[in-house]
Image (cartoon, helix red, strand yellow):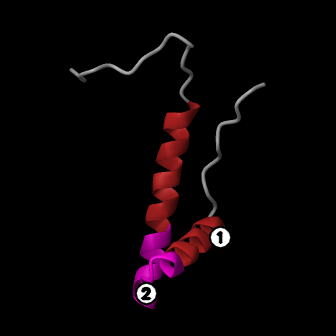
Amino acid sequence: MTEKTPRPLTEAEAEALMDAAAIAIALPIPEPCRSGTISNIVAASNAAALVLAFPLGDGDEAAPVFRA
């Protein structure tokens, strides 16, 4: 079985997610904030897709401390 890397959300999907989440937590999102909120959801989705697309082996583990 192969795992499929999730693709980034489209703007329409991000808008649907925002609307559903806002209803779920009873958070009104003012009209002037909607486009910025959608843009941020899309940006987070793009970043998540990059991270999830990085190949890891079965023996790979997270480092306990990141050092540059």
Mark identifier at residue 12: 1
Q: Looking at the picture, does residue 17 appear above or below residue 63? A: below
**Disc 1 crowd, CA 10 A, few/some/many (<14, 14-19, 20+):** few
Q: Which residue is mark 2?
A: 28
Dot 1 lies on which element?
Answer: helix
Q: In x, y percent, where is residue 18?
A: 53, 72
Please report whichever mark, 1 or 2, sits nearer to the chain's N-terminal start.
Answer: 1
- The residue drawn where x is 25% and y is 23% is 66
**Disc 2 crowd, CA 10 A, few/some/many (<14, 14-19, 20+):** few
Quadrant in the picture for the C terminus: top left
- The residue drawn where x is 65% and y is 70% is 12
Residue type, mark 2 in image: Pro
Mark 1–mark 2 Cα distance, whole angstroms, equals 19 Å
- The residue drawn where x is 43% and y is 63% is 40
Q: In x, y percent, where is residue 67?
A: 21, 20
Magenta stretch, residue numbers: 22-38
Quadrant in the picture for the N terminus: top right
- The residue drawn where x is 32% and y is 19% is 63
Q: Looking at the picture, does residue 22 appear above or below residue 55? A: below
